[in-house]
Amino acid sequence: MASNFLKKLLLPFKSEKKKELYHLRNMPRFTPAITNYLGIPFKFHDNLSFLTVYEEVFKQENYKFAMERQQPYYIIDCGSNIGMSIFYFKQNYPNAFITGFEADPDIFNYLKWNVESWNTSQIEIFNKAVWKEETVLKFEPEGTLAGKISNDENNNTKEIPAVPLLPFVENRKVDFLKIDIEGAELEVLKSIVPAIKNISKLFIEYHSLAGKPQHLDIILNILSTNGFKYHIKDVNPIHHPLIEKRNEGFDLQLDIYAINENLDGGK
């Protein structure tokens, strides 16, 4: 009886979600809007990007991890985009202190609007790229999820400030570090090796650039030699890797999950 009663109560909410999902799927791409699909007003810039990230973050729960110690928790989100990952962290780890980085100045405006609308504390966000040093980098925005650091000269390239990640991890324990920065992950990971012992759990989205050498072996060697056990998932698997080739953009994307066995996260 109780379960049937609860289902009846949830019917209007489910119906509204279905309507909103239909609206999101059928609206023109790259049309800025605000949706209540997450249960709160959430501003986005592109419907397909929103739905893709929703699938990864909230349905597949790519960033789900277990906490082994008492609060406060510390989460670093490199590549926050419009803030769906930060919202997921706040929902699941409400007492966590979260530091988020988003390099694209246009996308950062959406992130800022969303974070401020939640009226919550313990979130700091930076409109900067994470890098191995403090500098100015050339950045190529793509208007979706894949803006990246680039040496190519074109009308779309912007100059953005970059900060080293090391100071954010060297003086405190980091419960979870997410690195999804479209090809810059190797340089950033190498730069934090002196303090990698402070990181309990780590997520890296590895990007292999078509036509350029792969560096997966270096990343995995850094993890294994510093006490991490890792698990790898192919983001966009292909059926015949020895035949099929991707000749543009990223020819391989992998989700790498790593646990530091020297900390309580490995127990």
Image: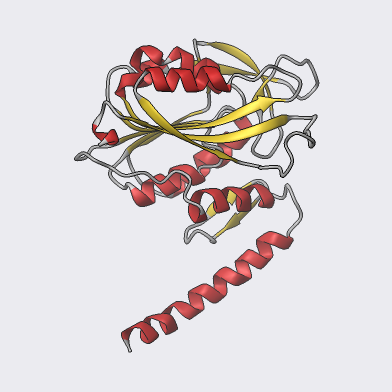
Give the camera-side residue of 258 and 35: 258
Q: Where, quadrant-wise, is the N terminus in this rendering?
A: bottom left
Give the camera-side residue of 267 and 173: 267
Residue lying at the far left of the rendered structure: 70
Q: In the displayed structure, does residue 257 sit left or right of residue 51?
A: left
Residue drawn at x 40%, y 14% is 193
Quarter of the view holding residue 72: top left
Counting the numbered discs, the total is 0
Relative height, residue 125 to residue 9 (above, below): above
The type of colouring in the image is secondary structure
Q: Position of residue 160 (x, y in %)?
A: 61, 19
Q: Can residue 232 be seen in this view?
A: yes
Residue drawn at x 62%, y 24% is 183
Q: Where is residue 212 in the image (x, y as percent from the top left)?
A: 72, 18
Q: Can residue 162 be seen in this view?
A: no
Give the camera-side residue of 164 and 228: 228
Residue drawn at x 79%, y 37% is 244
Residue lying at the far bottom of the rendered structure: 1
Relative height, residue 233 to residue 88 (above, below): above
Residue drawn at x 60%, y 71% is 18
Give the camera-side residue of 262 and 90: 262
Relative height, residue 99 to residue 167 (above, below): below
Q: Where, quadrant-wise, is the C terminus in this rendering?
A: top left
Q: Position of residue 39 (x, y in %)?
A: 47, 61
Q: Where is residue 253 in the image (x, y as percent from the top left)?
A: 63, 34
Quarter of the view holding residue 21: bottom right
